Amino acid sequence: MLKLPCYEPVDWVTPQRGEVFIDVGAYTGWYAIQAARAVGKDGRVVALEPDETNRLQLANNLKLNHFDNVTVSSRAAWSKSGVLGWYVGAQPVWHRIDSKNESALVETTTIDELARCADLRRVDWMKLDVEGAELEVLKGASDVLQMFHPSLFVEVHGTFDPLEQFLSATGYEISRQAFDHPPKEHGWILAHASASRTDE
């Protein structure tokens, strides 16, 4: 966690007091903790982390930092709810949905379903680190994107072109991008709803 600011453009992510932040692929909680601190007691963080070991460390880190404005879900975000294959990688940051190489099963939910069940009246930020499932997660967030226009911070795993097409069709614009494995194989994007979209 201490090394993350040297690796990712964490300064792109700027939640404000009172906002709602959804952390998809929360791992051990770096973004969830920073967001919880930023949004304060009037805001809320919803963190999804399917891996049990990662989720236990996430819960411990939240407890150590005395945050009570974070809800943790054990489900994986996807384009539909159900049960899918889960690949447990050699490193805890590599776990992912993968029915071809599955070593376990995982329950899935959509961001839209999550928002309804949690009775979220706003969503200001969504952070995604889902090891290649970026597009599937966003497909399951169509209502949230349409109603709330959250800012999106997405780690890209070989999905830039379809992501760019999807975001453009959804009324989003990529404002920042950075890649450590060119051409656009692995990196990060920051996207916002276009001005015309937010005026609707």
Image (spheres, rainbow, N blue to C red):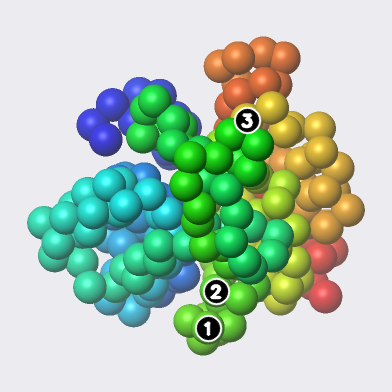
At 16% from the left edge and 55% from the top edge, which residue is drawn?
60
Disc 1 to disc 3, how far (Cα)? 29 Å
User: Which circle's residue, 1 or 3, is located before the other in the chain?
Assistant: 1
Relative horizontal placement of residue 166, taking residue 32 as reference (left or right): right
At 53% from the left edge and 83% from the top edge, which residue is drawn?
117
Q: Circle 3 — which element?
A: strand
Q: Are marks 1 and 2 in contact (CB under 8 Å)?
A: yes
Q: Circle 1 — which element?
A: helix
* Mark 1, residue position: 117
Amino acid at circle 2: Leu
Q: Residues within 10 Å of mark 1 (few under 14, many from 20)?
A: few
* Mark 2, residue position: 114
Amino acid at circle 1: Cys
User: Which circle's residue, 3 or 2, is located before the other in the chain?
Assistant: 2
Is any part of residue 32 visible from this angle?
A: yes
* Mark 3, residue position: 157
